[in-house]
Image (tube, grey):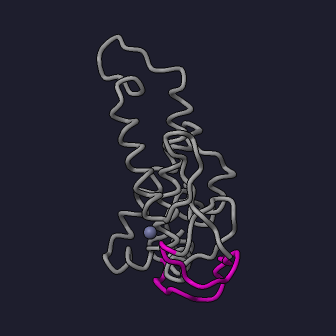
Amino acid sequence: WALQYYWYDERGKKVKCTAPQYVDFVMSSVQKLVTDEDVFPTKYGREFPSSFEALVKKICKYLFHVLAHIYWSHFKETLALELHGHLNTLYAHFILFAREFNLLDPKETAVMDDLTEVLCSPTPRNVGASGDWEGPGCGFSPRASRESRSCQQSDFSPVRPSPWPPELKRTICVLRRLR
Ligand SMILES: [Zn+2]
């Protein structure tokens, strides 16, 4: 099982890279785009480019990859730092925004559907639910069971099946119970 991250260099050549490099490429490229006056004009009377929508979709796709990578490879650390609430809120806002303006291809995001369903479903929360983390009746089933991943040896492909980290699986079960 060997998935690989790829980036396209300035000449459009496809190059292999590690997950940290990929995240760095994404952040640099998004930063460059959102501060580009030709793409996001801030002066009165300036036109948005005809490629605006395509560029925004591209930005969303890259940012989704980064979020998915954090969930897949670093959720344990996120929990240890007690940042998972912030991560989940960020993810939910991002997905709902993208959904509202049709900025993400459902095929690209399908791999995260289990999480999206529990975080973005409009069902009201049942506050009285118990906090049991791994009881029976949780419908969650990982798509595959494989060893854990690390940045260096793994990679990200949004269309390939992958296991959830156990900590994330438990969180999804809890969120399901709270609904
Ligand atoms: Zn990483």
The magenta span reads 129-152
Q: Residue at x 44, y 71 (%)?
A: 127
The residue positioned 49% from the left and 81% from the top of the image is 167
User: Closest to the observer: 58 or 175?
Assistant: 58
Q: As drawn, is 83 to the left or to the right of 62?
A: left
Report x, y in % for residue 141.
68, 78
In the rendered view of the protein, which quadrant contains the C terminus? bottom right
Q: Is residue 103 above or below residue 133?
A: above
In the image, 112 versus 61, the foreground residue is 61
Q: At which x and y percent is residue 12?
A: 57, 41
* The image quarter in which residue 135 lies: bottom right
User: Quick check: 163 left or right of 172?
Assistant: right
Question: What is the magenta segment's predominant secondary structure?
Answer: loop
Name the residue: 31% across, 76% down. Answer: 81
Residue 163, relative to residue 6: is it above or below?
below
Task: Judge whether residue 141 is colored magenta.
Answer: yes
Q: Which image quarter holds the N terminus?
A: bottom right
Q: Position of residue 94 (x, y in %)?
A: 46, 50
Where is residue 143 shown, x and y percent of the image? 70, 75
158 drawn magenta:
no
